[in-house]
Each structure stands twice: as C-alpha cells, then as structure tokens.
Amino acid sequence: MDITTLHILKDLILALLLGALMGLERERSGGHIAGMRTFPLISLVGGICVVLGQLTNAHWLVAVGFAAIVALTIMANVLQARRAPDPGLTTEIAILICYFVGVLLLYGQTILAISMAFATTAILYFKPHLHAFSRRVEKKDIYAIFQLGLISFIILPILPDRSYGPFDALNPHHIWLMVVLISGISFLGYLILKLVGNRWGGPAVGLLGGMVSSTATTLSFSRRSRETPQLSRIASVVIILASAVLLVRVAFEVAVIHPELLQPLAIPLSVMLAVGLLMALIAWKKSSSDQPLVLEPKNPAELTSALTFGLLYGAVLLAVAAGKYYLGSKGLYAVSLIAGLTAITLSSARFAQVGTLSLFQARNAILLAIMANLAFKLMVVSIIGPLALTRWTALGFTAMALAGVLAWWV
C-alpha cells in the first residue's frame, strides 16, 4: 500500500467520522429521514466520487453523485410524507452539506471540511437556543446589524488608504477601520448582555456592561443608586467590574493594531485588572442586597455614534501628531489626559506601529488615559451617586490606580 493510498484512506475515514458526527445529532433528535448510519455513508459517497473522478479524469462524477443524493433525498421525503408529513428542510440541507464535506476532504480542503461539519452540527444541536434567541431579537436589533454591515462592508472598502492633512496624520481607511472595530466590540457586548440579561446578577452585568461601555454603565448605576440607595454596594461592584473589563478591551484593541505594544503594557494592565477584580469581589461579598438589577443597554451600532467616534479619533490623531511635533513627549501626554481613552489607545497604537511614537511613549500615553478615565468616572459617581457608592467606588478605583502606577514605574 503506497503513500497515496494511505492518504486517500485517511481522508475517507475522516469523512466517515464527520458524517457520523452530523448523523449522531440527527439520530438523537429523532423522526428524520437520515441518521447515524446514513450521514456517514453520504459523506463517504462524496469522497468516493472525487477519487473515481481523479482516477478516470471524469470530474463530472462529483456532480452525478450530488444529483443522486438529491434524488434519494426527494424520494425519502415523498415516502415519509405519506406517513408523517414534515415541512422542515433542515435535515435535507444537512445531507447536502454532508456530501460536500466528503468531497472537500478528498480535494485536500481538510480544515474547510471539518469547519463545515462542526458548524452544521452546532446549528442543528442548538436549534432550541437559536429559536429562543430569534424570538428575543427586536426590530431595532436587525436595524443595528444592517448598520454594522453598512460601515464594515460598504463604506470601509471604498475609503482611500492613504494619508492626508497636516503632518500626514489622517488616513480615512484607518480612521474608519477604528470605527468598525469599536462598533463591532460594542455590538458583540450588547448581544451578550441581551442574551444573559439579569440572570447572573450584578457581577455579570458589570462584566458585560464593561464590554458595551464602562462610562455608560457608571452613569446608569450612579443614577440608580441615587434613586435606590440600598443598591449602592452592588452598584459599586458593577462599576468596578466594568472598569476592569475596560482594561481587557484596551489590551484587545492594542493587540489588533500593534501587538508589539502589548509587551510593555502587559504588567500594568494585568496588575490593575487583578486588583480591580479583587476589589469587586470584596464589595460583592459584603453586599447584602438581593434586589434584581435590570440593565437596558442602548443599541451601540448606531451610525451617529460611529460618526462621532470617527471625528473624535481623527481629532486625536491630529492632536497627538501636533503635540508630538511642537512639544515632544509632554504634548503627547497632555493630549492623553484630556482625550477619550479609546481614541488615545487606538491612535497611540497606530502611531507606534508606523514608528511615529516609540513603544515607551505609546505605553505612557495609554496608561495616562486609563488613569484619566478612572478619575472622570469617579467624578461622575461623586456628583450623581450617593455617598456610599462614592466611597466604595473610590476605594476600588484608587486601588486600581495605585497598583497601575506601581507596576508602571517598578
């Protein structure tokens, strides 16, 4: 048995296993025209058609095999309809995919075939969850998906990828890419928050609220604590956790734009995150409130918000470039203190990537922006929220800031 034969046998066995995986799911759900035995045979047929086509130089055999599978599926449906009519087409579509899984494997597309098989099995298995999710999706959610698609797949590709303006600081494609990045992160957090809602209480709301907007979460729970003072302790848990999750977002954004910048940021961000989680845990353990939390996030994928951020990011790019040109590092750090955290993170990472800023300068700018962001949110809490919320939030934010400063300079 030569190497080629062994390779073909390996792919055919894998086709059988992937078909069996899909068939197992159909078998356990019951009442379908194909199951644990039929699905692996279908994927095997697809693989054999490819082998025969290659041996005889008759690649049309793949199409003939597909037509045969379609004909058999139609016949099985006609026979089943006489006994128990079933208008669903899910199993039938899965059968066609199973055939092409076998075809792809023998054409050497192993990763694609495995991905298709597992994705199809997941869709079949999570049918109740997908149906439940579809019932919870509102009209505004569909509208938001269309808007996210608009800014990602229509506007972004047509924008010029070149530098314009003073100091060559403005690249329309890069600016809009940041808009897409932030909108995508926010929308993902929004969907997760919509899925789990209040099921897991304050800690989950803090973690997921931080993905959407830590500032918005701080503002929301400051107001809620003012209206219901007994929620102050649990509200502090939410606010501290949201700010801790923000550090994860910063690391993710930096990793996407300029992964090398993660190394000098890793220790300060990790220490601040650990301290933030610890402080939130302490506040959670001392909390005696069992009043349910209801967080109703606004849909983040609005074009107005995206345009606003695009303008802010462009302005920060200009400010950072001008500050660096006229005032050196001091100008950069001054901009970091007053600019938005997300904008300064992305702009600093971008400038570090192209070499305008050193990794040291970009790291300092981002850490200064983080400290300024914590100070701003603490000011919001002290103005809007009750004294108890201010005390706990100040304790958590101060511990995070001190830990970050120590890790920054040590």
Image: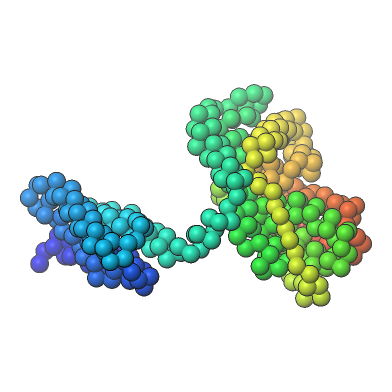
Which residue extends farthest right? Answer: 387
- The C terminus is located in which quarter? bottom right
Q: Residue drawn at (81%, 72%), measured in percent from left and top?
A: 289
Which residue extends farthest top? Answer: 165
175 versus 79 height, above or below:
above
Residue 406 placement, left or right of 257: right
- The N terminus is located in which quarter? bottom left
Residue 257 placement, left or right of 35: right
393 versus 344 height, above or below:
below
299 versus 286 height, above or below:
above
Where's residue 198, x and y in %? 68, 64
Residue 45 placement, left or right of 397: left
State how the image is colored. Answer: rainbow
Q: Residue drawn at (76%, 41%), measured in percent from left and top?
A: 339
Where's residue 307, x and y in %? 66, 34
Q: Nearer the viewer, residue 237 or 128?
A: 128
Quarter of the rendering containing residue 391: bottom right
Residue 23 visible to an observer of this rendering? no
Residue 211 visible to an observer of this rendering? yes
Where's residue 241, x and y in %? 72, 62
Q: Nearer the viewer, residue 384 or 70?
A: 70
